[in-house]
Amino acid sequence: MPKISLALFDMHDVLCRYDRAKRLDDLARRSGKPADEIYAAIWGSGFEGDADAGKLDAEAYLAGFGDRLGYPITLREWLDNRKLATMPMPETLAIMAMVKQRAKVAVLTNNHTLVREHLNFLFPELFALCGEKSYVSAQFGAAKPDPEVYLRCVAAAGGTPSETLFIDDSNTNVEGALAAGLQGYVFIGAASLERALMAYGLL
């Protein structure tokens, strides 16, 4: 197996379960709008995709979110709503902690900079493991699976592409990493990930 000096993890559905339905129910309660209309206005419109790609700063993002919601959501309300959807996955967090003893670890998630800035509140278990090496796509001006986002993230984490293993539950995102010259692994569960990391000598 190739030498790996950096293990780069996706966040959603690898290190935590992401339950958008909980967010939508809460947003519907706050705004009085049906959940399906909220989904269409925010996630189905390309708005979140633009935010993930770094096209909106924090002020523009919150204002745009509120406009689409029909409710002037505050930062605190947005953070409380976002936290509802984040359920830590202890098994993979424990694996990351073990890998950290042998290699660098970092995270790359398609998200707005607000997630990075407030990660200690949103996902303290991950912040404790990675801290400032928890990266969001928006800070690099591109989103997965654009090969450029992986290269910029690896550079920020102090790694090299050929010695980086990228772990994501999305085949498309792993293909983007491979196109950027990284090693890739499609996550399907903690047990199989553990076996794969043992083969790489990371456990």
Image (tube, helix red, strand yellow):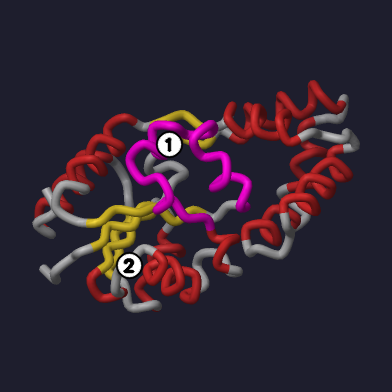
Task: Please give left or right for residue 121 compared with residue 186 in the image.
Answer: right
* SS class, disc 1: strand
CB contact under 8 Å: marks 2 and 1: no
Tell me the kind of residue under disc 1: Cys
Q: Position of residue 179 (x, y in %)?
A: 39, 78
Q: Residues within 10 Å of mark 1 (few under 14, many from 20)?
A: many
For this rendering, which residue is in front, 9 or 123? 123
Question: Which quadrant of the view contains residue 16?
Answer: top left
* SS class, disc 2: loop
For this rendering, which residue is in front, 8 or 91? 8
| Residue linked to disc 2 | 158
| Residue linked to disc 1 | 16
Q: Position of residue 55 (x, y in %)?
A: 71, 65
Residue at the image position 87 percent from the left and 35 percent from the top: 72
Residue at the image position 43 percent from the left and 42 percent from the top: 13
Q: Which residues are magenta?
A: 112-136
Q: Which mark is residue 140?
A: none
Give yes or no for residue 114 being in the magenta stretch: yes
Question: Which quadrant of the view contains residue 160?
Answer: bottom left
